[in-house]
């Protein structure tokens, strides 16, 4: 099974690929599965440039624009889209709109939309984790809210989910933004998949923490490697490189993994 980063803040392989503030990963299993679609059409353009298959399944990690903005080029009534119901709600951060930039009715009419709060096995040994129980620290956004039934409420980003892929080497955890918190997400992935998380790829949102908390979180990980992207933050990546040593991988658009 191959995992390819097709949208990120930086390009790792200089082959004409584009970077953006956004994130998207392609998993090539029995079907082509896309976790998130980036912030614009960049993910689609990079997918074409990388000569990758079009996805038959799309999983939305949460409803922020930088993970859902590139949905339109993938419009196909045969494609299944998995998302938490809250992913389609209007949401705001520091007074500006940061939610999904598509009308829900358009998405529902253009895809086979499957809304879920519980974990869903979208392919054998691949789970969309659904709403993640929170025991440890989270990575939420201050001064943010969503609108539900015409009323404002604090945005706890309950729709935040990730993908867990189980193989003979353990569980590979693919993160979108990890607003639920890295320790919570790892714990839930292990419970759902029934095995230890041995690899982490994606946005860890460690940018939300100070150095002491970042080190505390990293020291709990029992992984073979961690490849942080998007919302991790350069400071956190530098700390990660120091704490994790050669288990830390520098990645970006064009990076590929075999699991």
Image (cartoon, rainbow, N blue to C red):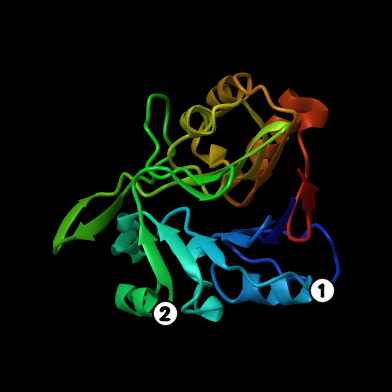
Q: Which mark is residue 16?
A: 1
Q: Classify 10 Å Cα crowding around label 2: few (below 14), some (14-19), many (20 and above).
A: some
Q: Classify 10 Å Cα crowding around label 1: few (below 14), some (14-19), many (20 and above).
A: few
Relative image position of residue 35 (x, y in whole percent): 56, 57
Q: Which residue is drawn at 76% across and 34% down?
A: 248
The answer to whether one can see residue 153 in this image is: yes
Q: Residue 113 carries which label?
A: none
Relative image position of residue 37 (x, y in whole percent): 55, 66
The answer to whether residue 179 is above or below residue 169 is below
The image quadrant where one finds the C terminus is top right
Residue 30, quarter of picture: bottom right
Q: Which of 122 and 229 is in front in this view?
A: 122
Q: Is residue 102 left or right of residue 209?
A: left
Q: Residue at x 57, y 68 (%)?
A: 56
Q: Which of 18 and 158 is in front in this view?
A: 158
Secondary structure at numbered mark 2: helix
Q: Which residue is drawn at 35% across and 65% down?
A: 96
The answer to whether residue 233 is above or below residue 189 is below
Q: Is residue 128 left or right of residue 56?
A: left
**Mark 1 or 2 closer to N-term?**
1
The answer to whether residue 17 is above or below residue 169 is below
Relative image position of residue 166 (x, y in whole percent): 63, 37
Q: Disc 1 versus disc 2: distance between alpha carbons?
A: 30 Å
Mark 1–mark 2 contact, CB under 8 Å?
no
Residue designated by label 2: 110
The answer to whether one can see residue 98 in this image is: no
Q: Which residue is drawn at 30% across and 56% down?
A: 86
Viewer-nearest of labels 1 and 2? 2
Secondary structure at numbered mark 1: loop
Q: In this view, does 89 lie to the left or right of 163?
A: left
């Amino acid at each position: 099974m191959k995992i390819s980063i097709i949208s990120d803040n930086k390009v790792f392989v200089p082959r004409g690929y584009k970077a953006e503030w956004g994130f998207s990963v392609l998993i090539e299993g029995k079907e082509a599965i896309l976790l998130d679609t980036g912030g614009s059409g960049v993910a689609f353009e990079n997918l074409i440039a990388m000569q990758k298959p079009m996805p038959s399944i799309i999983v939305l990690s949460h409803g922020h624009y930088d993970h859902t903005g590139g949905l339109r080029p993938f419009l196909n009534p045969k494609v299944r889209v998995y998302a938490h119901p809250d992913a389609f709600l209007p949401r705001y951060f520091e007074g500006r709109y940061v939610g999904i930039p598509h009308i829900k009715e358009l998405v529902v009419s253009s895809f086979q939309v499957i809304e879920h709060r519980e974990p869903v096995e979208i392919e054998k040994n691949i789970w969309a984790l659904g709403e993640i129980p929170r025991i440890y620290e989270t990575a939420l956004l201050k001064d943010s809210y969503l609108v539900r039934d015409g009323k404002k409420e604090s945005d706890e980003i309950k729709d935040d989910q990730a993908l867990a892929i189980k193989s003979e080497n353990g569980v590979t955890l693919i993160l979108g933004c990890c607003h639920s918190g890295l320790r919570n997400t790892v714990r839930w992935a292990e419970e759902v998949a029934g095995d230890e998380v041995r690899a982490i790829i994606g946005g860890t949102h460690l940018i939300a923490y100070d150095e002491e908390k970042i080190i505390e979180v990293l020291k709990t990980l029992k992984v073979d490697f961690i490849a942080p992207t998007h919302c991790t933050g350069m400071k956190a990546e530098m700390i990660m490189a120091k704490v994790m040593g050669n288990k830390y991988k520098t990645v970006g658009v064009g990076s590929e993994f075999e699991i």
